[in-house]
Amino acid sequence: MFQNSRLALAWLHTWLGLLLGFVLIVVFFFGALSVFDREIDRWAIPQSRFAPQPMPSFDKVLRPVFESMQPTAESVNSMRERVKGATPERFDTVRRWGAYTTHRDPVLGIFSGYEIPNAKDPEDAVWGSRTIDPRNGNALPDDRLKIGSQFFYPLHYSLHLNWLSLGYWIVGFSAMVMLIALVSGIVMHRKIFRELFTFRAKKRGQRRVLDLHNLTGVVALPFHFFFALTGLIIFAGIYFPVTQTQLAPLHELHEKLEAQETGLPQHRSGIVAPLASVDVMMTEAQRRWAARGMAGEIGFLALQHVGDSNGYVSVYRAGTDRIALTGEGIHFKASTGAVLREDPPQTAVATVNEFLTGLHLQHFRHWLLRWLYVFGGLSGCVCIATGFIFFVEKRKLQHAKQGKQGVRIVDALAVTTVTGTLLATLGMLTANRLLPDQLPTGWPARGDLEQYLFWASWVLAMAHAFWRSAPVAKAGISPAWQEQCWAIAAMAVSTVLLNWITTGDHLLRTLGNAYWPVAGVDLFILTSATVAVLAARNLRQRASSTASASNKETVHA
């Protein structure tokens, strides 16, 4: 079929890249945005625009909030079919309280789990969650969507297709294909180091596009390979669910043995017991970490079997001083504050796994490395986008002569995925600033509306791309590229202006106060507007040149 292995790999690289490049560009783009997901959250929720806060006092701030919580209506409704008889109106048996924060979080996310007295499966629980101001315990509005951490970040790895974990499987398969495409691309470009320094900007047409494709692919090659691999490792439990299938009969035995080994009770005793001062336990955990030469910031706090004599408190270190996703948990008896256990050092295999996971999830303090992550993600977007363009440019003249529509479809999908993704993102941010704080009765929640407008913007971008794709079938350039670039520029400027109008936080103010989360998001949006204007002008010049060449050919004919 192929004359040599390089031609076979070229075919594999081309068609696998085309097939799943539409998924990978979404993964890359929203992965790049997720590097600063907490900062995007602050931009989207003006009430959270204050400095990051440490874990607050449990006794004074968190405990009253936890005691006032109940499961969410969504959690209770999802359990109705798994309950014998009527669902209780109130849940008082607390299985778990938890609070999580990072060095970038001004607000605090907390959750609580409750046992269900008449559940068919005793392991089932209902859950409540709340986002609070850690300075005073006041709750933020429940209908506010954390666009960065609750939408862009999950979109990066699940595509928000949660039925049967379909999105995870699509992204996982795409990551596998990406690894194949990377290897085949390396073999195809035997002079890989020359490709690293080759970009002939003065060349026109396919040569310049291919140079940019090679350059962006090679410059960030280690980044692309590593993150595809570690992403597969992180979700290996979904792709290879051994513990949920083949080893299911051993699961309960494993929990019992683990409880015996760690000394941490697996179940409630049924004996009521008071809760000692958790603040004292937190202080003791920090003292022990300091004695071991570790930073003492608390990242995660969990209380298990609350109000029971088997209750215990787990305090985990934030670990922002190192790459590995570590916790160094210290566990206390809830009723007395006595230390039950300090987590021992990890095994070699677990240490490697935590290092790879931590490097992928980047919970550490290193702003330069974060920006390198953004650069790597965006370079992946450029690499895939130029691959689409090269595919179309190489074939559109031939398809035009043969009357085929293949490149027209590919070009429209490329527009949808490249510029359409930006339009959908800006549409969501614009909606975030335009929607009123209080919506009329009967309307969907504010966060739900923002998500609907995101998908609607993307669908409109796709419809526009297909509608304007006719010139591609005649070996021309689709006007949709230029038109959507102008739309991106207009929406980007409008979004920044709307942020100013609705919150008063204009760039001069945020830069003057060195409030980089909001200033950074605004600057990033304006940068995208600049790039879009430059791209639109370049496309306009190309379209004019193509039209002039066509007119000359017509005259000579």
Image (cartoon, rainbow, N blue to C red):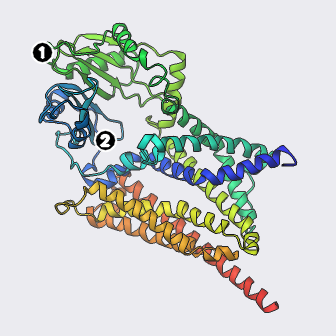
Quadrant assignment, res 550: bottom right
- Between discs 1 and 2, the one toward the N terminus: 2
Quadrant assignment, res 293: top left
Tell me the element at label 2.
Answer: loop
**Residue 224 point in image, percent of width and height:** 61, 43
Q: Residue furthest front?
A: 85
226 vs 115, nearest the viewer = 115
User: Which residue is drawn at the image coordinates 50% and 66% (left, top)?
Assistant: 462
Q: Which residue is mark 1?
A: 272
Q: Which residue is mark 2?
A: 52
Residue 62 visible in this rendered orientation of the protein: yes
376 vs 413, nearest the viewer = 413
Q: Three-letter amino acid code at disc 1?
A: Val
Residue 36 visible in this rendered orientation of the protein: no
Q: Three-letter amino acid code at disc 2?
A: Pro
**Residue 400 point in image, percent of width and height:** 72, 74
311 vs 89, nearest the viewer = 89
